[in-house]
Image (cartoon, rainbow, N blue to C red):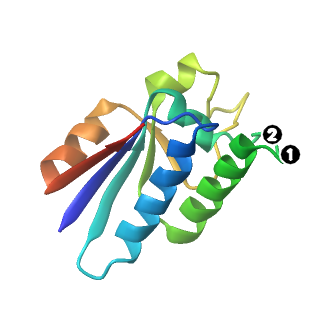
Amino acid sequence: MQFALLVNAAADSAAALTALQTAKSLHQHPDHQLYRLFLYRDAVHLANRFAWSGDGDQAGACQQWQQWVRDSGIDAIVCVGAAQRRGLVNNEAVNNLAEGFTLAGLGQWADALINSERVIQIG
């Protein structure tokens, strides 16, 4: 069974870590496939490679998400509109998008909806 995961949770919320655990579980389950991860609204901060690296929950969530996306090779899309409104960009002048994440539009989310049997939204 294929799943699409929409994460709206802010990086400093407990829901961000719940979403990460959900994504990991779906990815590791032998009968399930995480077709696409889509970060939307304040969840786009999870993909900021310059996220503060102190002891706070926000930094921990960002670092954990970024490491998992990098290691898993999952299709991790960051909504380009939400990212630009929050200062997250990927161009020649400025690149603060973490490795493994891709900026894309809602068309990628629509594709995930078409190609997935189930949708989970967290946040």
Q: Which residue is mark 2?
A: 52
Q: Is residue 49 visible?
A: no
The image position of residue 64, as x and y in percent, is 65, 58
Residue that lies at the very extreme toward the top in this rendered image: 85
Query: Which residue is at a point 77% across and 40% down the rendered structure image?
Result: 50
Instruction: Report the amino acid beneath label 2.
Output: Trp
Of 28 and 81, which appears nearest the observer?
28
Q: Quadrant of residue 107?
A: top left
Q: Residue at x 84, y 48 (%)?
A: 55
Residue 97 image offset from top left, x and y in percent:
64, 41
Residue at the (46%, 51%) spot, across then down? 19
Judge by depth and name the residue closer to the eye, 18 or 49.
18
Residue 45 in the image: x percent, y percent? 61, 35
- Secondary structure of the residue carrying tag 1 is loop
Q: Which residue is mark 1?
A: 54
The three-letter amino acid code for the residue at tag 1 is Gly
Question: Counting other residues with Cα less than 10 Å from the Cα at mark 1, is it few (<14), some (14-19), or many (20 or more)?
Answer: few
Toward which corner of the image does residue 32 lie, by quadrant? bottom left
Q: In the rendered image, is residue 25 in sight?
A: yes
Q: Is residue 12 left or right of residue 122?
A: right
Marks 2 and 1 in Cβ contact (< 8 Å): yes
33 to 12, vertically: above or below: below
Front position in the image: 43 or 113: 43
Which residue is situated farthest in the front direction here? 14
Q: Is residue 100 above or below residue 45?
A: below
Camera-side mark, 2 or 1: 1
For the N terminus, which image quadrant?
Answer: bottom left
- Above or below, 19 against 108 in this view is below
